[in-house]
Amino acid sequence: MKWSIKACLLILFASLSLSSFAQKGNQKDLKDGAKSPNAVLKDSLMQDVSIKSFRGKYVFIDVWHSRCSPCYAQIPALKALEKEMKGENIVFLSINMDTDEYRWRGMRKMYPGIPLWDNKGFFSKAFNVIYTPRCILIDPKGNIIKAFMPQPSKPEALKLLKKLFNKQ
């Protein structure tokens, strides 16, 4: 009996290790300084919008979904951050990860910035987004400044943006 339990545990451990190894090999973790991947999202008129279309501006991406209470908690800070950066060469994108359009449509007006919907999951795959809230910062040339940007409620987020625009 003890031998069979040990054998089962060994098999389970080996299969989990192999699946974890295989998954890591497929992940494309974003790295600070790397070229940003592209993804096509939908805007509120269901028109295609490419991440590349924002080249020439800094791009602050806030990724959220409708059942994420920590995402909601970031809304006031995100609005304040956008207000603080008004007039600067930066665009704020609020990208929703829900699979159901009605969830996104029902909440998109709550979020500041340009509301976009990752209806096909292309963005989440290209940017390896596996949880929300998640923020990403891209420079005007399309390079990742911060793959894991501090949340808007963290003082480091405002400090980094002010530094980019010499507003210290």
Image: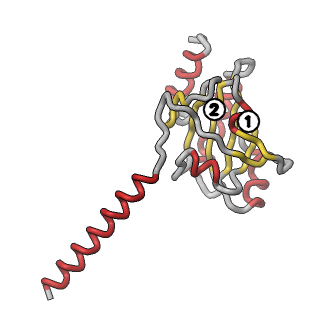
Left or right, 164 with reference to 13: right
Task: Check disc 1 and report its element: helix, strand or loop.
Answer: loop
Above or below, comparing residue 101 to residue 161 in the picture: below
Callout 1 touching callout 2 (CB < 8 Å): yes
Identify the residue at horizontal 56%, vertical 46% (top origin).
133
Q: Mark 2 Cα within 10 Å, few/some/many (few <14, many 20+)?
A: many
In the image, residue 30 lies at what x, y percent? 49, 39
Residue tagged 1: 113
**Residue 80 lies in what quarter of the image?**
top right
- For the C terminus, give its image quadrant: top right
In the image, residue 11 lies at what x, y percent? 25, 74
Residue tagged 2: 60
In the image, residue 116 lies at what x, y percent? 73, 45
Q: Amino acid at mark 1?
A: Gly
Identify the residue at horizontal 71%, vertical 25% (top origin).
83
Choose between 35 and 84: the one closer to the eye.
35
Task: Check disc 2 and report its element: helix, strand or loop.
Answer: strand
Above or below, comparing residue 42 to residue 141 in the picture: below
Residue reaching furthest to the right = 45
